[in-house]
Image (spheres, grey):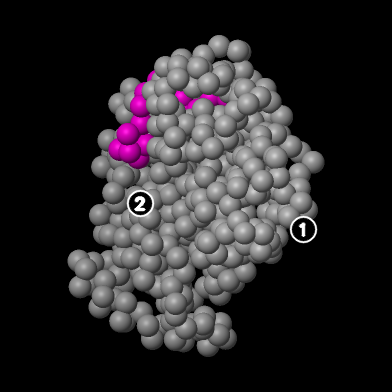
Amino acid sequence: MRWAVTLGAVGSALFLGHMAMAQTISGSLRPELRPDRHKLSRAIPAPILALTDASVLRPQLRPGAAAEQSPPPVDPSQADAGFQRWLPGMRARAVAQGISGSTFDRAVRGVRYDPEVIRRDLHQSEFTKTIWEYLDSAASDTRVENGKAALQKNRRTLEAIEARFGVEKEVVVAIWGMESNYGANRGKNDIIQSLATLAYDGRRGKFFEGQLIAALKILQSGDTDPRGMTGSWAGAMGHTQFIPTSYLEYAVDFTGDGKRDIWSDDPTDALASTAAYLARFGWVRGQPWGVEVTLPPNFDFALASRKVTRTPANWARLGVVGVNGKSVPDYGSASILVPAGSQGVAFMVFKNFSVIERYNAADAYVIGVGHLSDRIKGDPPFAASWPRKDRALTFAERKEVQQLLTARGFNPQGVDGRIGPKTLDAVRKFQRAQGLAPDGYASFRLLERLR
């Protein structure tokens, strides 16, 4: 869910309704944005996704996850003593928000300052991946086969969840696969210790203190015990990686045992909570997230925008059809998405695309979930190919693109390495001036031409 959350990649745990940046756990495929870059546009085209191995774009209603301006982190050699002195003040603030003293004391018993959490937060080594490299992993043959097996093993439960919430079982399973590799990589960090360490550290203290209070409320409700509350270093929990605030708002008790248990080996409550979350944000049963389409040779790429919506029939009049050559069925208003520009796969995306975005705002993540769910249903891989000779731009190269666009009179309104709507518009204007397809794709080939 969108804390703008993790895959170990771009820009999700279930920062489902209120997330900011969390760390990805091993095996998770959640694209995420680094904390200081969570405002990147969802329309970012491919080399696009700057994927990190540390935080995540978890679903959330975005409480403002940007890194806070605050003092530098505490020296780990002195940190635990300071951390222990900080705890009584934190206890007072928790009690003022309805947490009993006994709940707090039980939760923090034995908790220490965790320098590894801070190390991971500070050293989120950035690397870049193209969208096709990301999708190669997200919908690999192994992940597809494991997804089919997970669906079959839990079919009765998933069918009951689908019946209640109206979210297709394959979509729920795909998110499960992306978030924790079907439960194999749920994270083993002590959530209270991790959140308390991050709240004490101070750089994003307000956000993580809020998550800590939410985690204490979960404990106070009796859904789990302090040491059973485990997950990723940044607070994402369970099979589908909810953060505490999202858990409080969206998790459900589907088994009827009186607890919303997303931590145990039984994934029932976690899967139902994911479906409940998607349903809450308007999932349309029977509507695809998107479908692969073929664009006509003269397609106006200015129309490839999430702001431009038409019915499939209207798109067909412009020559946009399914890969079978026929008009796409009328699933509702749709937009055209070309995440790798004119040389890559094109999609017609519907409302459900936006609903999955609530889980993680990165286009690559949404396409990954959607395509994985389709493959689990038995659909084939994409028919079109990706421009695999391209490589992703580094952060410095993205800034260089913006600098060169500015120097040539195509002002992207800033040089920050973020390929957002204004930069895309500047790229399109430059491409038109050069007689190129104005697809807004900021590729290495475009950078070379700018140079």
Disc marking residue 451: 1
Of residues 325 and 211, which is closer to you in this image? 325
The reply to whether residue 319 is in sight is yes
| Residue plotted at (51% across, 65% down) | 36
| Residue plotted at (38% across, 86% down) | 85
Of residues 435 and 88, which is closer to you in this image? 435
The residues tagged by marks 2 and 1 sit, at their Cα atoms, a distance apart of 40 Å
Answer few, some or many: residues within 10 Å of disc 2's Cα (few below 14, many 20 plus, some between 14 and 19).
Answer: some
Circle nearer the viewer, 2 or 1: 1
Of residues 448 and 152, which is closer to you in this image? 448
Q: Which residue type carries mark 2?
A: Leu
The spot of residue 89 in percent (x, y) is: 30, 81
Q: Which residue type carries mark 1?
A: Arg
Disc marking residue 61: 2
In the displayed structure image, the side of residue 4 where residue 375 appears, left or right: right
Q: Is residue 286 magenta?
A: yes
Please state, as top left, top right, bottom left or bottom right, where the C terminus lies in the image: bottom right
Q: Is residue 131 magenta?
A: no
Quadrant location of residue 252?
top left
Tell me which segment is drawn in magenta: 276-292
